[in-house]
Amino acid sequence: MRAELGKLTQTCDWLAPNTPKRGKTMQDQRSTRGLLLAALFLLTIFSNEVSCKQPKLYPQPNYETKEYWTRDAQQSMDRASRVLQQLRYSAKNVILFIGDGMGVSTVTAGRILKGQLKNSSGEEASLAFDEFDHAGLIRTYNMDRQTPDSASTATAFMCGVKTNGYMLGVNQDAKLGSCSTYDSRQHDVVSFLKFASEQGKATGVLTTDRLTGATPAPAYASSVSRQWQDDTDRNTDDSSPDSPEQRRRCPDIATQLVDRAVNFTVLMGGGRLKLLPKNVTTMDQFGGVQVNGTRSDGINLVERWSSLQRQLGRRPVYVETADELRNLRADQADSVLGLLSTEKMRYHSTNIRSEGYREPSLADMTRKALEVLRKNSNGFALMVEGARIDSGHHANQAQRALYDVLAFDEAVQVATEMTSIEDTLIVVSADHSHVFTIGHYGYRGQPILGKMVSKSSDGSLQYPALVPRHSESHSAEDVALFARGPGAHLFQSVHQQSYIGHVIMKAGCLGWYARTGNCLQDPESATSAATVDPALPRMVRHRLQSMDRASRVLQELRYSAKNVILFIGDGMGVSTVTAGRILKGQLKNSSGEEASLAFDEFDHAGLIRTYNLDRQTPDSAATATAFLCGVKTNFYTLGVNQNAKLGSCSTYDSRQHDVVSFLKLASEQGRATGVVTTSRLTGATPAPAFASCVSRRWQDDTDRDTDSSSEDTVEQRRDCPDIATQMVDRGVNFTVLMGGGRLKFLPKNVTTVDQVTGRTYRGTRSDGVNLVERWKTLQGQFGRRAQYVETADDLRSIQPDNVDSVLALTSIADMQYHVININSSGYREPSLADMTKKTLEVLTKNPKGFALLVEGGRIDNGHHGNRAQRALYEVVAFDEAIQTAMEMTSIEDTLIVVSADHSHVFTIGYYGRRGQPVLGKVMSSEEPLRYATASDGMQYTAVSYGDGPGAEVGRPRRNISEDSPESSYDYRYPSLVPRSTESHAGEDVSVMARGPGAQLFHSVHQQSYIAHVIMKAACLGWYADTGNCLKAPEAVSTTSPGDIPTTTTKSAVAKVSRQNVSLIMSAAALIVLRSL
Ligand SMILES: [Zn+2]
Ligand SMILES: [Zn+2]
């Protein structure tokens, strides 16, 4: 079988074109084979369809030169300053766009598809909301679930209150399915749309689901069950504890749509049958057949809606077809009911391919709705749901899901064009994520939907799934939020989903915010933190404090950063952050979903695009080059730009290829500089801080000399110094270097003790050079008091006042996993927090300030082995190190940035109960407590992987009924595609920041932007040379930004002058604000 597969891999190599330029690696071979294995073993129904066509890559844009990353950074910074203008307005109009199930991985994949449909490589494309000015992350858990459903999440983002799963428009005191205990006065919560309609604004709800579906329903309805869409659904619901008679007291959702949303201006979506009685037929325009309504009570709610509207003196318009919608004249309609499909509306991918009737697109609906809504001089509130993203994912039909992202994006685009950023707040978010992942180190421009999908014309092809379930599951990880317009700046961090409802109400001056005058206003009348009334309910107080945090941006703009610390969690994607947060809480014996990592509390957040110049899914060397040096480059290369060739020393030219890290720039300015890692100091992430190398593999000279993947001869390669040598020579002015990898610095004839095992090892260098001794000698030549340490005790005993420089090689290779280290009965290595603390004690002595990189390196390794427990404990250790840094520095002068280099194909989901062990098996929501089972009758874990060594090869899924995964750090979690090592993922990662310059992270950014913000905030490199630094506002207005390097084109010159204007405007606005 293996041999056969090997042959297939060679002939059907559709994923990774084996061109000499790309330099194919063993890893790619494995990746290709892994995917094919998946296709063969798990996708048996499609295995016949795998053919051997030529591989296709979409073309990469030619503008992504090394200069591009600088220009891109300037633009992003300009956008950050718009916050000042936005603070001065309140929102006349608000629009909330919800992509149902549109997690971060779906956003990234949708963006790539959008680009590829325009025949570009795609990773660099932008969805309309990628360009919004503000971003945040949203915690989606329910009151009773780790992984939420859409009814409770919609209640949170529209009504501002989290509730239990499967209920809507009611608070957590209501009981699922129990009408007999339901009390509307005690249980109902009110949506911002309802408030808006009560205040005389126009109000609209649009969806591609049924209008009675879980997401639109809480806009107007309160129901103890999301299933009660019409009376028949309610009467036949055997899951309810009530008798059918008891249930009849609670009106079904369709009835509430007509009665309680009577003052809504526009209601448009599918689900016509829920409003019609069984004896009434209606045309399914798409299918071309007549179908009967589903109501048992004989009531025709469409007619009831029309007569109610006329009683209120309105001119109502009811529409069913695309033509009727197109012909609807906004000036002749006071209210609109559009039931554009008998059931859910069609998938966008199905609709656009139809030869016959086509339903209106979400963009068509949005355009028409806005024409009607904007007639109201009081303004409007609108909710738009892109619902079928969710349905596509539930069926593992990624093409359907992603095309619906594009339809959703078009609707957002229409809204941005038809409204003004000055008076309209637009918020784009999702209710929850899905266990959907993209990864496997694909090449840049690789078709995001893979080859197999091109065989399928209707998008119905199912992608491989790990756990067999009748419906793919939601995921528990945070989703992203994007916003623009008045109030958008209030999204700036990690927020509860209920916060969305509050920001909209504050910005639009609705509900409680209107009654108490606590609205977004002109700065002259803006309220300060002191007005947060301590008597307010705790949840409300918390929201208000969140909003106060947003206004700190004004103070932050006034400082530059004396110190900068960049924390990188290697491989810490959004799903890993969420899972790590839950583990942190559970280790303190709480349910966990509500816990916070230290950086969850930071004031500013953004998303980071991680792709490499030549890869859709990146490696750590190229990503580190981006965030340390400000330039994106090619896979596996570090500290060099894209013109350097992987593994080719003979074509390498340092003057043309090298790029410089912010740490190097800081050390040249006489600031203290540190690099701390739990991996080897010569590893891919720390290395670009001090080294430039055409291959991340060349950690010592032996690695370099024996690298058979290089096209150079050994002699040619020897012209390029290995990374360990560069650390000692080029990092000679670094103050603290601390991490593992001792053997890379010692020659083969020198031995050293591995403190963990007590065993003796030889160095691995072939050149006979003892780099530890060389480091000591060099430091002595500079007249420094240098200290070299190896053990935890020696590290602890360092007296900061007595040292000028420190080299700590705390392990022979990578350091121990945190979970193993803390459970060791013998020697324990220092923790990342210990290392960070000692480093800061030394660095803070320098009066000029410092720059520091801290890597939590082993999160990545834990995931690569499918050992989630190891990975997540590393997140907890990483978090402790950040906490230490926060305590030892001041927010006034120290910029702390926390991000990841890339994500992993790691996911957390399956509707687990609130508080179930995040590392354990999924628990059913039914009583008594028991484990849930999949379609094959077997149990499954809450976390799992898209690929890796945890997969079964040629066998059915593992039976884990006897396993207790959370009790062993050796446990390998299940994965789908068998690979010797689990792979990185291609989705965006988050960035969190606090301190001066933190406000410059506010949206979706390129990874290279991180280095630019740090350099601007701390005044390093080009920013220092040109005086283009973060400064007190008094100084800003008189400073010319100077020439941006590489600005030779006309448009670049225009950009400089625009930037000039915006800086001056910022300064003026600040002076106004400061004079309050
Ligand atoms: Zn769903
Ligand atoms: Zn990795």
Image: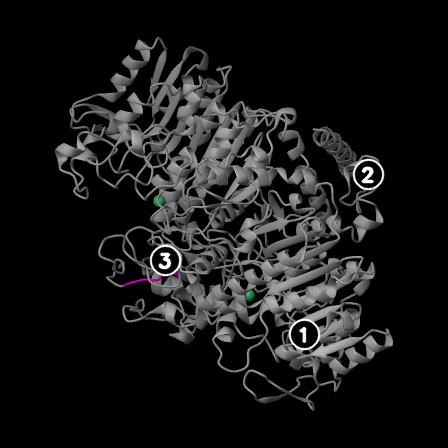
User: Which mark is on residue 465?
Assistant: 3
Residue assigned mark 2: 1035
343 lies above or below 597: above
Residue 576 included in the magenta stretch of the image: no
Residue type, label 1:
Trp
Which part of the image, by quadrant, shows the C terminus?
top right
Where is mark 1, residue-wise? 698
- Quarter of the image containing the N terminus? bottom left
Q: Of the residues under marks 2 and 1, which one precedes in the sequence?
A: 1
| Magenta-drawn stretch contains 942 | yes
Q: On the image, which quarter does residue 341 sit in?
A: top left
How much space separates mark 3 and mark 1, taking CA atoms?
A: 37 Å
Are circles 2 and 3 on residues that touch, CB within 8 Å? no
How far apart marks 2 and 1 lie (CA) works out to 46 Å
Where on the picture, by quarter, is residue 943?
bottom left
Residue 458 in view of the camera: no
Dots 3 and 1: beta carbons under 8 Å? no
Q: Position of residue 122 (x, y in %)?
A: 56, 47
Which one is nearer the viewer's eye here, 30 or 517?
517
Relative to residue 1069, is residue 727 depicted above or below? below
- Where is residue 241? Give x, y as percent: 17, 42
Query: SS at mark 2?
Result: helix
Position of residue 561 measured from the top left corner of the image (x, y, whole percent): 73, 50
Identify which amino acid the numbered label 3 is placed on. Answer: Ala
Q: Which residues are magenta?
A: 939-943
The amino acid at mark 2 is Ala
Depth check: 860 or 409 in front? 860
Seen from this angle, which residue lies furthest top?
A: 313
